[in-house]
């Protein structure tokens, strides 16, 4: 009864203990301790194992030396009775000396008998419980039954603990994933996110190294994106194409791969033999929306036994990594877009406030070179007339480069010249960006290789500057490394080029307007000076002339007494030349005044006959001298004209005095007037030498004088007809000449009639 | 005998006019600037004023305006002597009622004709 009571209470204790969900190592040592007590034994040893494994997973002992505990563990398969390992039947060993291992332990620990009890769960062997007795122990057979009872309880307990451990690991993994997810949300860089994922993977699986490789969309290479535990040298040496190596296999098939014994697998062959040793590896694909974008691999130097569950856990982590990569990619995209916007915004903003072309050029080339991290850049402008490119501004360009660019055959766009075969010329001709990702491999621009070597660039991009349709220049950016333009960069350059082009054109236009404004002001200034000169001359020249002419005429008129014929003749000469000087001054002043826009007209209604008669009065003497008859014929009903009386008189005077001058003696000069439409047409007809057709267009030009003896022998300023033309045109009329050589000339001009018939 | 006031800052011109007009039997008084001209016009009540436009102190146009604005002198005929050929100046002078104008340099004979015309003295006598 006592025994039974003790057994029951012990069993209860064990059940309570086992139901407390302890972790496996705790459980194992608790059971070992309980087993000793339960079997009234001297020592016990408990191993949790898998039937397929050589060594137990967890071992605990009670009252056994660590040496013996370890020895039992190391040589597990050697001493385990076959009935236990194969039939899961307990074995009672009364003579431990029969087995070498157990014999050594029995001797060392002073033990003599043992019972080996299999622990099963779902008919599978999950552990072995061994209880030892010393030589003094009795009634071993009596203790077997209770031990079996205990063993029956231990099976499920261990299974539970196993599951629990699994649950714990799962929870830990979930926790890791949670951590990762949490952090990724706030991550500034993809690298950092991936490092966290890899650290978690290494921690969870107890591995040493991990890599995340991404498939380069351009080269299809599996580029190492992030890694943990690798030397840089090794990483550089494992360059893999999309289908090479174990990683390549995963990338290609989109399936996970476990290589617990990696070196024996042919797929692993790409790993450098002399590189850091790898025993086991596990790789899973990184998938975004069903597309494999890369591979997450973990590996260890120590051999590992990765399971399917490990694989699914790593796949979960890979999912997180893929999300992190995708998120970061999207984030990077947004960030890049922002950066792009910033580039464009800065460009537009700065250019909007830049007025002069040199500053605009300078800013464009500096800003875009820096934004794209170019080694150096240049902006060349297209000269429309010569179709040549001229350096407008440069960024960090060497003197040699600038010198070369300024050579005429480099400036030319003619395809027959070196310049015409340059990427810049291509960009301008094709009106699109010309990108050379590696000048040393590009077959189109082999001529540039030498210069590229000298200048230290490998790639370049030429952006045509096209404000609307016509290129105005080209921006060239040179990069140290072989740089392949990403679509987003291409777009950005295109937009930046367009923005720059528009701004540049505006600046050029502004500059031109500014120049025009300066010219206009200078002209105004000149005009002002001219006007001042005119009024100065008109006063200061006339004043002495007034005195000279006045006194000469006074003496000639005989008011100062009788003159001798010679005195009279000579004074008449003085008088004539004074008249000429006055005429010349008047004409020059009139021309100046007209050109300075200072000729004012006072329009009034005039009777043409009055004006003509007034002007003929002083010309009479001249006409009489040559016996020229002046005939005025104004058609009846000719209306009054709207004109400046003084200036209309001047027109008539100029035409009539010319007619008299160039007419032969004893001829007739006719002046006619008749209405034509809303104008009055006035004609001055002479019988003079006439004007040749080629001279006809020139007679109204300033200072033009007929190329013949008659004209040459007659005095004139060459300004009269040109003043007449200006004055007629200022009145809104037209003047022209009809003539044949030797047939006389007819000068005609129109002048506006007064519309009101009543006046 | 009609009294003529000649106003010009150029002494040579004044002497020329004095000589020629005196030859016609006119009484000629003269001065060289605008303010003096206004004083003389008030005091002497000339029958005609021959007035230069470009003068220091006060230009001829201003003198003309003042002559026209004073009751005592407002109806005196005036002939303007001008070196200017601007139609604007001529037009302005005409609006202030000038009898005639003559452009420098001038023929003294023509001036005499114009003076007689302004004084309503028959020519060719």
Image (cartoon, coloured by chain):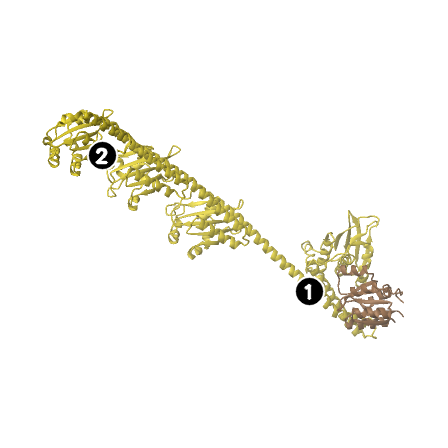
Which residue in the protein does label 2 denote?
Answer: A29
Q: Position of residue A627 (x, y in %)?
A: 81, 62
Tag 2 subunit = A
Q: At x 59% / y 55%, what residue is drawn?
A: A514
Q: Nearer the viewer, mark 2 or mark 1?
A: 2
Q: Viewed as shown, does residue B69 lie left or right of A198?
A: right
Pick the quarter of the image with the N terminus of chain A. top left
Counting residues from the start of the chain, the first of labels 2 and 1 encountered is: 2
Give the distance between the C-alpha atoms of the residues marked 2 and 1, in whole angstroms: 124 Å
Label ID, residue A533: 1
Residue A494 left/right relative to A699: left
Q: Which chain is brown?
A: B
Kindly indicate whether the residues beneath marks 2 and 1 are on one polypeptide chain. Answer: yes
Label 1 packing within 10 angstroms: few (<14), some (14-19), many (20+): some
Q: Quadrant of residue A575?
A: bottom right
**Residue A648, quarter of picture:** bottom right
Q: Which chain is yellow?
A: A
Is A634 located above or below residue A53 in the figure?
below
Q: Is residue A474 left or right of residue A124?
A: right
| Image-quadrant location for residue A694 | bottom right
Q: Secondary structure at mark 1?
A: helix
Say whether residue A136 is visible: yes
In front of the other: A90 or A611: A90
Q: Position of residue A710 (x, y in %)?
A: 72, 61
Q: Position of residue A509 (x, y in %)?
A: 57, 51
Chain of the residue that carries numbered disc 1 in the rendered image: A
């Amino acid at each position: 009864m006592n025994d039974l009571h003790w057994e029951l209470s012990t069993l209860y204790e064990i059940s309570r203990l086992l139901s407390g969900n302890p972790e496996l190592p705790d459980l194992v040592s608790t059971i070992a301790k309980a087993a000793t007590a339960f079997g009234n034994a001297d020592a016990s040893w408990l191993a949790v194992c898998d039937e397929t494994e050589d060594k137990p997973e967890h071992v605990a002992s009670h009252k056994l030396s660590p040496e013996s505990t370890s020895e039992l563990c190391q040589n597990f398969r050697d001493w385990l009775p076959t009935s236990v390992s194969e039939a899961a039947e307990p074995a009672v060993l009364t003579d431990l000396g029969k087995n070498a291992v157990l014999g050594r332990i029995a001797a060392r620990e002073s033990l003599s008998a043992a019972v080996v009890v299999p622990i099963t769960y779902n008919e599978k062997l999950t552990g072995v419980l061994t209880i030892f007795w010393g030589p003094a122990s009795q009634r071993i057979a009596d203790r077997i039954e209770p031990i079996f009872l205990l063993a029956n309880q231990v099976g499920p307990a261990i299974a539970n603990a196993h599951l629990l451990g699994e649950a714990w690991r799962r929870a830990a993994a979930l926790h890791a994933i949670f951590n990762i997810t949490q952090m990724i949300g706030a991550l500034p860089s993809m690298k950092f996110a991936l490092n966290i994922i890899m650290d978690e993977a290494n921690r969870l699986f107890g591995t040493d190294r991990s890599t995340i490789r991404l498939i380069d969309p351009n080269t299809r290479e599996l580029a190492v994106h992030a890694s943990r535990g690798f030397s840089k040298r090794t990483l550089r040496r494992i360059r893999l194409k999309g289908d090479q190596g174990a990683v390549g296999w995963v990338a290609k098939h989109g399936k996970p791969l476990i290589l617990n014994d990696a070196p024996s697998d042919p797929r692993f062959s790409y790993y450098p033999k002399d590189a850091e040793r790898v025993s086991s590896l596990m790789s899973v694909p990184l998938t975004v929306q069903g597309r494999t974008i890369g591979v997450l691999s973990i590996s260890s130097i120590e051999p590992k036994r990765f399971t399917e569950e490990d694989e699914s856990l790593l796949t979960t982590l890979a999912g997180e990594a893929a999300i992190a990569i995708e998120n970061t990619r999207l984030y990077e995209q947004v960030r890049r877009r922002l950066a792009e916007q910033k580039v464009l915004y800065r460009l537009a903003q700065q250019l909007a406030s830049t007025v002069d072309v040199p500053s605009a050029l300078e800013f464009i080339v500096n800003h875009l070179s820096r934004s794209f991290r170019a080694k150096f850049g240049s902006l060349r402008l297209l000269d429309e007339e010569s179709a040549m490119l001229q350096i407008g501004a440069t960024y960090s360009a060497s003197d040699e480069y600038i010198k070369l660019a300024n050579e005429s055959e480099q400036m030319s766009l003619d395809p027959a010249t070196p310049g015409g075969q340059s990427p810049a010329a291509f960009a301008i001709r094709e009106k699109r960006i010309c990108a050379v990702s590696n000048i040393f491999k590009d077959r189109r621009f082999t001529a540039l290789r030498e210069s590229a070597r000298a200048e230290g660039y490998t790639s370049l991009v030429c952006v045509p500057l096209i404000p609307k349709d016509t290129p105005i220049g080209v921006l060239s950016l040179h990069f140290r490394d072989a740089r392949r333009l990403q679509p987003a960069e291409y777009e950005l350059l295109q937009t930046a080029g367009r923005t720059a082009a528009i701004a540049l054109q505006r600046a050029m236009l502004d500059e031109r307007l500014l120049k025009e404004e300066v010219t206009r002001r200078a002209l105004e200034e000149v005009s002002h000076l001219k006007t001042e000169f005119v009024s100065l001359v008109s006063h200061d020249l006339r004043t002495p002339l007034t005195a000279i002419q006045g006194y000469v005429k006074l003496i000639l008129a005989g008011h100062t007494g009788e003159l001798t014929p010679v005195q009279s003749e000579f004074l008449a000469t003085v008088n004539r030349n004074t008249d000429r000087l006055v005429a010349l001054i008047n004409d020059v002043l009139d021309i100046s005044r007209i050109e300075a826009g200072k000729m004012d007209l006072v329009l009034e209604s005039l009777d043409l006959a009055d004006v003509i008669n007034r002007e003929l009065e002083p010309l009479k003497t001249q006409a009489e001298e040559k016996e020229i008859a002046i005939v005025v014929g104004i058609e009846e009903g000719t209306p009054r004209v709207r004109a400046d009386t003084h200036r209309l008189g001047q027109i008539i005077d100029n035409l009539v005095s010319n007619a008299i001058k160039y007419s032969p003696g004893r001829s007739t000069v006719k002046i006619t007037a008749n209405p034509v439409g809303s104008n009055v047409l006035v004609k001055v007809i002479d019988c003079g030498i006439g004007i040749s057709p080629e001279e006809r267009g020139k007679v109204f030009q300033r200072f033009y004088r007929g190329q013949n003896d008659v004209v040459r022998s007659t005095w004139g300023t060459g300004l009269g007809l040109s003043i007449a033309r200006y004055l007629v045109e200022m009145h809104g009329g037209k003047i022209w000449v009809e003539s044949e050589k030797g047939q006389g000339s007819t000068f005609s001009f129109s002048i506006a009639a007064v519309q009101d018939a009543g006046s | 005998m009609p009294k003529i006031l000649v106003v010009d800052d150029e002494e040579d011109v004044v002497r020329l006019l004095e000589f020629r007009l005196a030859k016609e039997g006119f009484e000629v008084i003269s001065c060289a600037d605008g303010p003096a001209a206004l004083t003389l016009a008030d005091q002497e009540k000339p029958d005609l004023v021959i007035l230069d436009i470009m003068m220091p102190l006060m230009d001829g146009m201003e003198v003309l305006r003042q002559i026209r604005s004073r009751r005592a002198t407002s109806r005196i005929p005036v002939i303007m002597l001008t070196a200017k050929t601007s139609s604007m100046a001529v037009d302005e002078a005409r609006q202030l009622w000038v009898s005639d104008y003559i452009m420098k340099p001038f023929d003294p004979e023509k001036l005499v004709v114009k003076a007689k015309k302004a004084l309503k003295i028959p020519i060719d006598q």
